[in-house]
Image (spheres, rainbow, N blue to C red):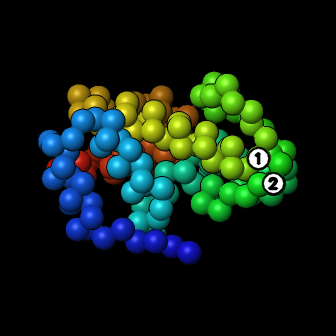
Amino acid sequence: MQTIIDTETLNQLKNQVALCDKAKIAESLLSLLRSHRGRAESELSVLQALAIDLKLKNGSEEFNPLAPNDKNWKGDKPTMLTTLSPEPWQTEVDTCKRLERLALVLIKRWVINSNVKISNDLIRRLPKTAVVLAWSKSFLNA
């Protein structure tokens, strides 16, 4: 199911940027970026973008981070995700939690920090995610 986030909700977040601390802004932005906002590449869920960029599959099945379940995780465990938590990584839900942690780290570093541009390294390593983050950054800074 595709969820469209309306412009009014995004504008409310933008208006609160000056009033909130950066951690709250990052968490709010992650909440908005978890779901689809439309059909454009920049409107992809940040979790789906990360899953695509990291080529996450549970065994031979495509992994949908928007619909995780308690299936055992049989896919690769990229270093980028394993270093985020010492907790056991056993299920699709655990995978999704790690994607959310990574998304929050990336949002804090590349979106909330207005003095930092999206790097070429990020674009090379996580191209779809970089598009979502760049859209978010341009929206907040507009």
Q: Residue at x 42, y 48 (%)?
A: 30
Q: Secondary structure at mark 1?
A: loop
The residue at 67%/25% (across/down) is 86
Q: Nearer the viewer, residue 50 or 8?
A: 8
- Say whether marks 2 and 1 touch (CB < 8 Å): yes
Residue 136's place in the image compared with 64, above or below, is above
Q: How many marks?
A: 2
The x, y position of residue 136, in whole percent, is 33, 49
Residue labelled with disc 2: 71
The reply to whether residue 127 is in sight is no
Residue in the image at 14% along x and 42% along y: 18
Q: CA distance from mark 2 to mark 1?
A: 5 Å
Q: Quadrant of residue 112?
A: top left
Which numbered marker is on residue 57? none
Rendered residue at 64%/41% (across/down): 54
Quadrant location, the N terminus: bottom right
Give the labeled residue for mark 1.
Answer: 91
Residue 113, above or below 50: above
Q: Earlier in the sequence, mark 2 or mark 1?
A: 2
15 displayed left or right of 108: left
**Left or right relative to 72: residue 112:** left
Percent coordinates x, y for residue 62 in the rendering = 74, 57
How many C-alpha atoms fall within 10 Å of the one at disc 2: few (<14), some, or many (≥20)?
few
Quadrant of res 99: top right
Residue 42: quarter of image: bottom left
SS class of the residue under badge 2?
A: loop
Estimate how packed mark 1 is, as few (under 14), some (14 to 19) or many (20 or more) residues with alpha carbons within 10 Å: some
Rendering coords of residue 139 (x, y %)? 25, 52
Q: Amino acid at mark 1?
A: Thr
